[in-house]
């Protein structure tokens, strides 16, 4: 065995491991969500008319309404919590809408959460919780 062959073999092993790791990381990544383009005059994407109605009138939706963004990790935690507890709810992905619909949804959101932050959960009687605060959400939904 030559003097440098051990380091070359180690290099090849490390290279193979890095390639495998990269493969599995990329394979596990979520694919981007295909979103419908909002209609320029309304800002409402085709197929999201009901979500828009719930977004501007969460109390009339009949189920808890969660204002969310596709990129919000706290929103994911709240959605997982609601799903885990079997709570029927409506998700309003505000970033799916463009103006003027987004502006109208944000006006409604700010009437429940003046900061306009995410997630915001509104129940049909108008009470709300801002952020994912498990105890507050349980109390709001009567789970405690």
Image: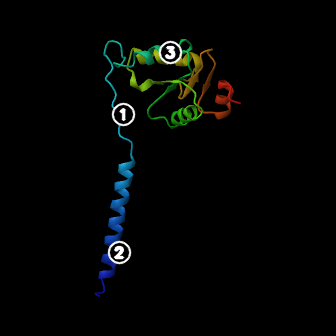
- What residue is drawn where x is 44% and y is 19%? 51
**Label 1: few (<14), some (14–19) or many (≥20) C-alpha neighbours in 10 Å:** few
Mark 3 or 1 closer to N-term? 1
- What residue is drawn where x is 35% and y is 40%? 31
Tell me if 125 is positioned left or right of 54 in this view.
Answer: right
Mark 3 or 2 closer to N-term? 2
Disc ID at residue 10: 2
**Residue furthest right as drawn:** 144
Question: CA separation, marks 3 and 1?
Answer: 26 Å
Q: Quadrant of the C terminus?
A: top right
**Label 3: few (<14), some (14–19) or many (≥20) C-alpha neighbours in 10 Å:** some
Who is closer to the viewer here, 50 or 128?
Answer: 50
Q: Under tag 2, what secondary structure?
A: helix
Residue matched to label 3? 107
Question: CA separation, marks 2 and 1?
Answer: 40 Å
Tell me if 142 is positioned left or right of 22 in this view.
Answer: right
**Label 2: few (<14), some (14–19) or many (≥20) C-alpha neighbours in 10 Å:** few
Where residue 16 sits in the image (x, y, percent)?
32, 66
**Residue furthest front as drawn:** 86
Residue 138, by quadrant, is top right
In the rendered image of this protein, does residue 126 appear above or below residue 84? above
Q: Under tag 1, what secondary structure?
A: loop
Where residue 94 sits in the image (x, y, percent)?
44, 24
Q: Under tag 3, what secondary structure?
A: helix
Question: CA separation, marks 3 and 2?
Answer: 60 Å
Mark 2 or 1 closer to N-term? 2
Where residue 104 sits in the image (x, y, percent)?
46, 14
In the rendered image of this protein, does residue 7 appear above or below residue 23? below
Disc ID at residue 33: 1
- What residue is drawn where x is 68% and y is 29%? 143
Who is closer to the viewer here, 81 or 130?
Answer: 81
Q: How many marks?
A: 3
């Amino acid at each position: 065995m030559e003097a440098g062959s051990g380091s070359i073999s180690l290099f090849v092993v490390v290279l193979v491991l890095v390639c495998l790791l990269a493969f599995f990381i990329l394979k596990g990544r979520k694919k981007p969500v295909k979103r419908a383009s909002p209609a320029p005059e309304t800002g409402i994407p085709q197929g999201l008319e009901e979500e828009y109605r719930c977004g501007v009138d969460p109390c009339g939706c009949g189920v808890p309404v969660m204002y969310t963004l596709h990129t919000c990790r706290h929103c994911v935690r709240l959605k997982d919590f609601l799903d885990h507890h079997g709570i029927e709810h409506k998700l309003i992905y505000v970033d799916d809408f463009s103006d003027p619909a987004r502006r109208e949804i944000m006006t409604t959101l700010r009437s429940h959460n003046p900061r306009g932050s995410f997630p915001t959960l509104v129940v049909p009687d108008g009470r709300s919780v801002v952020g994912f605060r498990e105890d507050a959400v349980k109390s709001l939904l009567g789970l405690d």
